């Protein structure tokens, strides 16, 4: 069972420490997104990386439409990896949607988690007038799904196979199919729906594991209002506002990201 | 698409290199450079024209501001990570937002370059209108195909279920068929046995009839001799006959006649049953037949002290053998006389029934009647109703059997209704002419 999960979720373990840091990638990518950050923790921690089923180099055959139709299925992946490696006292680092996935997992087995590091988290992306600002209207999300369809049709399903048949440049096909972190349009679309139509506001109150919220500047996906909302609603949480702009500080500003995480871990 | 290269790799003079901006502005596609933080560094005139901005308005903006909201999410979740991790992304479909608020669908290639120690994302943009339409159609077609496929799968599953059901039914039918075949085989065996049994029975019957015919002939010859010699003795040819002797001769003569009648009847029955009787069927007026029969029976009626009545529908024409009909009616009337006590009534009626196409000739008496348990067997040979009546011994017990066979032989029938003490009705049924 353990080895099955390790293969299924393409689990990679590195580092010299014993205390586990479990890095969970966000929607649209895979564990590679952490590569500018994880080296900074390998001296002191056991660094665990994985891909959700359906993303990256996970076992696509293990994809179950029902299980992964909600974030609960992804939270089960996190717990499966924890069980597979018998991880305890886990520092969970989740980007974007993985913040909420980590919260769901921590609510299921709070004793397994020591800290939650939430990078660009949002409990709900769609506005809920009049009191809640998520940043998006439902039509925006529909536009995103359309844009994804257009790109996946060009990339993964249409262009890539044609290029892969090009004997002169076989490296092209490989590069293109791996360039989109998850190449299956059905999986990507379902993950997008599970992510952007989710509402995890009611799960926040039950969280007992202390957490760090990393709030970027000018983050279109997780605006400042959302970070402030979380800071109010999430028990035992600390919020840090970053200089980094955009939604991916671990890629655009890895040094700042590492420093803030280390600060938090030292202080707490 | 060929990547734009820095003019540093050329050996052109400085003045000529200064034309790079002019070169960029002549490109038929939009060109855009932005830093990792999203800030726009360079745009060419073509992109400004595509999006409706002045160059001054574009530079210093965040690249997200040039995209729709959906485009911004896509940029953050897909484009930026891809370019950051892989250094480039090709043929991206992006929704730009023009200055006037309308959307512009475009294909973009993005490549990440380091220039003077700063990472810059260079982006070439081509507007796509037709391709976008085709892609919309393609996506719609694929969704339709997926739906059709799902429907087909459902229908296939349903067909599979029905197929299995039919197979089960077929197996059941096969089993039933086997059972039926076995039953059929058994029936065939029984049928063969029955055919054999019937052949045996028919053979036995033919043998019996043959035996009876032969025996009757053999018996009649000595009886005729007995009768002849009694007559000769009675005539006194062998000497004077005393009264006592005459009485004895009379008894011998009566017994001889009775025996002869019995043998004749047996012979008749045997011939009928052996199928050797021929019927001369013709249209015959029942009234004519009765005109022959009634005078023959009236003396017996009178002698027995019986009242005789007859009612005949005038237009009763049957299709039958006149001689056989007479024979049957005489038998029925003789029986009526025999079994009806003094003062009783014997009545004869003939009617026709258009509906059934039959003529009915009924002989009714007010005699002793036939017990219900004997009625069914009354047309069997040698059956006689037990009675205290002295004249019982006179019959052979073959008359009704012969009459019944004759009636049926002419395509008619002979039926009986009776009540003990109240009398009997025998009805001869004949086909209407």
Image (cartoon, coloured by chain):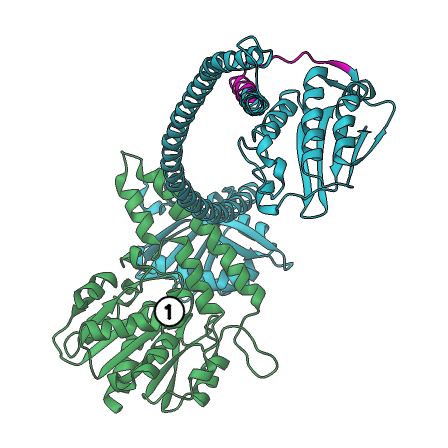
Colour in which the image shows chain A: green
Q: Is residue B282 magenta?
A: yes
Residue located 36% across and 68% down the image: A26
Q: Range of the magenta residues?
A: B263-283
In the picture of the structure, the residue carrying the numbered disc 1 is: A248
Residue located 55% across and 33% down the image: B380
Q: Tell me, yes or no, if residue B345 can be seen here.
A: yes
Compared to A201, does B177 lie above or below?
Answer: above
Q: Closer to the camera, A255 or A209?
A: A209
Residue found farthest to the top: B237
User: Residue B274: x and y, percent?
Assistant: 51, 17
Q: Is residue B239 magenta?
A: no
Compared to B104, does A53 lie above or below?
Answer: below
Chain under numbered label 1: A
User: Residue A45: x and y, percent?
Assistant: 17, 78
Instruction: Give SS at disc 1.
Output: loop
Chain depicted in cyan: B
User: Residue A44: x and y, percent?
Assistant: 15, 79
Compared to B90, does A192 lie above or below?
Answer: below
User: Residue B235: x and y, percent?
Assistant: 60, 11
Q: Which of the image's four quarters has the C terminus of chain A? A: bottom left
Compared to B198, does B14 lie above or below?
Answer: below
Residue located 48% across and 70% down the image: A220
Q: Closer to the camera, A195 or B210?
A: B210
- Circle count: 1
């Amino acid at each position: 069972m353990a080895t099955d999960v390790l293969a299924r979720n393409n689990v990679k373990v590195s580092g010299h420490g014993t205390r586990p840091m479990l890095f969970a990638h966000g929607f649209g990518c895979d564990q590679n997104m952490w590569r500018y950050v994880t080296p900074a923790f390998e001296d002191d921690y056991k660094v665990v990386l994985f891909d959700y089923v359906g993303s990256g180099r996970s076992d696509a055959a293990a994809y179950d439409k029902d299980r992964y139709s909600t974030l609960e299925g992804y939270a089960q992946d996190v717990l499966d990896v924890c069980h597979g490696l018998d991880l305890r006292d886990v520092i969970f680092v989740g980007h974007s949607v993985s913040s909420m996935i980590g919260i769901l997992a921590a609510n299921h087995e709070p004793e397994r988690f020591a800290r939650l590091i939430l990078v660009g988290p949002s409990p709900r992306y769609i506005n809920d007038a009049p009191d809640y600002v998520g940043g998006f209207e439902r039509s925006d999300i529909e536009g995103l799904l359309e844009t994804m369809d257009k790109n996946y049709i060009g990339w993964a399903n249409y262009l890539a196979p044609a290029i892969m048949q090009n004997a002169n440049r076989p490296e092209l096909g490989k590069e293109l199919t791996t360039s989109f972190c998850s190449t299956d349009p059905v999986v990507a679309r379902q993950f997008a729906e599970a992510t952007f139509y989710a509402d995890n506001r009611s799960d926040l109150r039950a969280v007992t594991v202390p957490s760090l919220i990393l709030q970027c500047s000018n983050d279109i996906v997780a605006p400042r209002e959302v970070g402030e909302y979380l800071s109010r609603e999430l028990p035992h949480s600390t919020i840090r506002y970053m200089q980094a702009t955009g939604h991916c500080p671990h890629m655009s500003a890895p040094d700042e990201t590492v420093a803030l995480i280390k600060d938090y871990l030292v202080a707490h | 698409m060929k990547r734009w290269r820095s003019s540093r790799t050329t050996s052109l003079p400085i003045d000529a290199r200064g034309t790079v901006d002019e070169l960029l502005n002549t490109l038929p596609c939009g060109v855009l450079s932005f830093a990792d933080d999203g800030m726009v560094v360079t745009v060419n005139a073509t992109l400004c024209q595509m999006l409706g901005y002045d160059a001054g308005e574009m530079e210093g903006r965040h690249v997200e501001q040039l995209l729709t909201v959906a485009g911004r999410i896509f940029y953050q979740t897909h484009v930026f990570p891809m370019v950051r991790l892989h250094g480039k992304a090709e043929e991206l479909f992006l929704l730009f937002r023009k200055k006037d608020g309308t959307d512009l669908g475009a294909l973009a290639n993005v490549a990440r370059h380091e220039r003077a120690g700063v990472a810059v994302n260079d982006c070439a943009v081509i507007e796509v209108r037709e391709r976008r339409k085709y892609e919309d159609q393609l996506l719609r077609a694929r969704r339709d195909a997926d739906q059709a496929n799902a429907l087909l799968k459902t229908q296939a599953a349903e067909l599979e279920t029905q197929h299995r059901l039919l197979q089960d039914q077929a197996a059941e039918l096969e089993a039933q068929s086997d059972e039926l075949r076995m039953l059929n085989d058994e029936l065939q065996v029984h049928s063969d046995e029955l055919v054999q049994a019937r052949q045996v029975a028919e053979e036995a019957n033919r043998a019996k009839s043959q035996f009876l015919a032969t025996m009757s002939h053999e018996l009649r010859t000595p009886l005729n001799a007995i009768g002849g010699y009694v007559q000769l003795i009675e005539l006194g040819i062998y000497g004077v006959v005393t009264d006592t002797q005459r009485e004895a001769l009379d008894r011998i003569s009566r017994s001889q006649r009775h025996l002869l009648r019995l043998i004749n009847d047996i012979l008749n029955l045997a011939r009928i049953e052996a199928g050797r009787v021929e019927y001369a069927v013709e249209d015959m007026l029942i009234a004519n037949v009765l005109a022959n029969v009634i005078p023959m029976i009236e003396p017996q009626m009178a002698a027995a002290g019986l009242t005789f009545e007859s009612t005949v529908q005038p237009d009763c024409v049957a299709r039958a053998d006149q001689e056989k009909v007479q024979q049957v009616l005489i038998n029925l009337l003789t029986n009526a006389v025999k079994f009806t006590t003094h003062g009783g009534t014997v009545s004869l009626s003939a009617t026709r029934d258009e509906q059934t196409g039959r003529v009915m000739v009924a002989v009714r008496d007010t005699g002793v009647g036939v017990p219900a348990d004997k009625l069914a067997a009354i047309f069997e040979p040698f059956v006689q109703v037990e009675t205290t009546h002295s004249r019982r011994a006179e019959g052979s017990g073959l008359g009704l059997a012969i009459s019944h066979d004759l009636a049926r032989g002419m395509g008619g029938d002979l039926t009986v209704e009776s009540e003990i003490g109240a009398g009997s009705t025998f009805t001869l049924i004949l086909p209407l002419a």
